[in-house]
Image: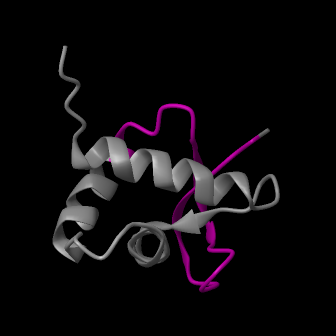
Amino acid sequence: VTVTYTTEDFVRRAVGRLLGIRRRGDGICSACLVGMTLERLHTGWRRSEIELAMGKVFTIPGALDRLPTGPCARCKRSMPCLGRSS
């Protein structure tokens, strides 16, 4: 049996790890998460692939929490963010 992973699967896993090391309630905006995810994944990924997958992660966050618009813990701009409640 061959298991095929999508870009969204890799991005979702990387974002979960990135948010897991932050304090509870800290939110990170999509733009910052794209950059942080690119830093975390190997160099073969294109920014456009990550951005497209990040849009899906923000639309259906799964185990992640969509936070109300507020300051990003990284860039401090006010925009919708993802975080972890627990």
Colour scheme shown: one colour
Left or right: residue 70 versus residue 36 is right
Split into 4 quadrants, where in the image is the N terminus?
top left
Position of 42 relative to 13 (above/below): below
Q: Residue at 64% across / 84% down in the picture?
A: 76
Measuring 36% from the left and 48% from the top, which residue is drawn there? 10
Identify the residue at image location x=21%, y=59%: 52
- Give left or right: position of 4 versus 24: left
Horizontal side of 1 relative to 41 (left or right) equals: left
Q: Is residue 5 left or right of residue 80?
A: left
x and y, in percent, of residue 37 in the image: 44, 68
In this view, the residue in front, 63 or 79, is 63
Find the magenta span and give its range.
Answer: 57-85
At x 23% / y 69%, what residue is drawn?
45
Q: Does residue 66 belong to the magenta stretch?
A: yes
Q: Position of residue 60 (x, y in %)?
A: 38, 36
Residue 28, x across and y down, in percent: 58, 67
| Quadrant location, the C terminus | top right
The residue lying toward the viewer, choosing from 12 and 80, is: 12
Q: Visible in this render: residue 58?
A: no
Above or below, 64 relative to 18: above
Whether residue 61 appears in magenta in the rendering, the answer is: yes
